[in-house]
Image (tube, rainbow, N blue to C red):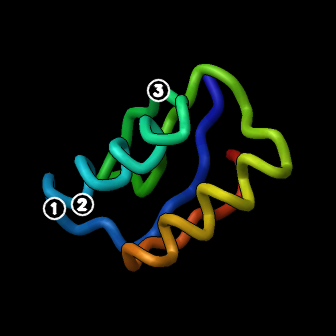
Amino acid sequence: MVNYEISGMTCNHCKMTVEKTFKALGKDAKADVDNEIVSLNDSLSPSEYELVQKKLDEEGYTLGNAK
């Protein structure tokens, strides 16, 4: 399990939006609003990271480093 920092989530709707963004790219993710992380089974490749980061930025969230 790999955890990535994520900021901008404040509610359950945010959690669902973040998880849907990863799912649209073929990644199963579990977002945690309270701890500001999103968990994946595998780490993202550099190109996947860049794509997800861009999509999340468009939604108002900031994807950070793996923890």
Question: Against 29, is 10 above or below?
Answer: below
Residue drawn at (24%, 60%), measured in percent from left and top? 14
| Residue highlighted by disc 2 | 14
Furthest-right residue in this view: 46
Q: CA distance from mark 2 to mark 1?
A: 5 Å
Question: Against 18, is 3 above or below?
Answer: above
Q: Which mark is residue 49?
A: none
Q: Considering only order in the chain, which callout, 1 or 3, is on the residue closer to the N terminus?
A: 1
Q: Quadrant of the N terminus?
A: top right
Q: Quadrant of the C terminus?
A: top right
Q: CA distance from mark 3 to mark 2?
A: 16 Å
Question: Residue type at mark 3?
Answer: Asp
Q: Is residue 12 left or right of residue 54?
A: left
Q: Considering only order in the chain, which callout, 2 or 3, is on the residue closer to the N terminus?
A: 2
Q: Is residue 57 left or right of residue 49?
A: left
Image mark count: 3
Q: Residues within 10 Å of mark 3 (few under 14, many from 20)?
A: some
Q: Is residue 26 left or right of residue 32?
A: right
Q: Of discs 3 and 1, which sits in the foreground?
A: 3
Q: Of discs 2 and 1, which sits in the foreground?
A: 2
**SS at mark 2 in the image:** helix
Q: Residues within 10 Å of mark 2 (few under 14, many from 20)?
A: some
Residue drawn at (44%, 72%), measured in percent from left and top? 61
| Residue highlighted by disc 3 | 28
Question: Residue type at mark 2?
Answer: Cys
| Residue highlighted by disc 1 | 11
Q: CA distance from mark 3 to mark 1?
A: 19 Å
Q: Position of residue 5 (x, y in %)?
A: 57, 56
Q: Position of residue 4 (x, y in %)?
A: 60, 48
Q: Position of residue 54 (x, y in %)?
A: 60, 70
Residue drawn at (45%, 69%), measured in percent from left and top? 7
Q: Residues within 10 Å of mark 1 (few under 14, many from 20)?
A: few
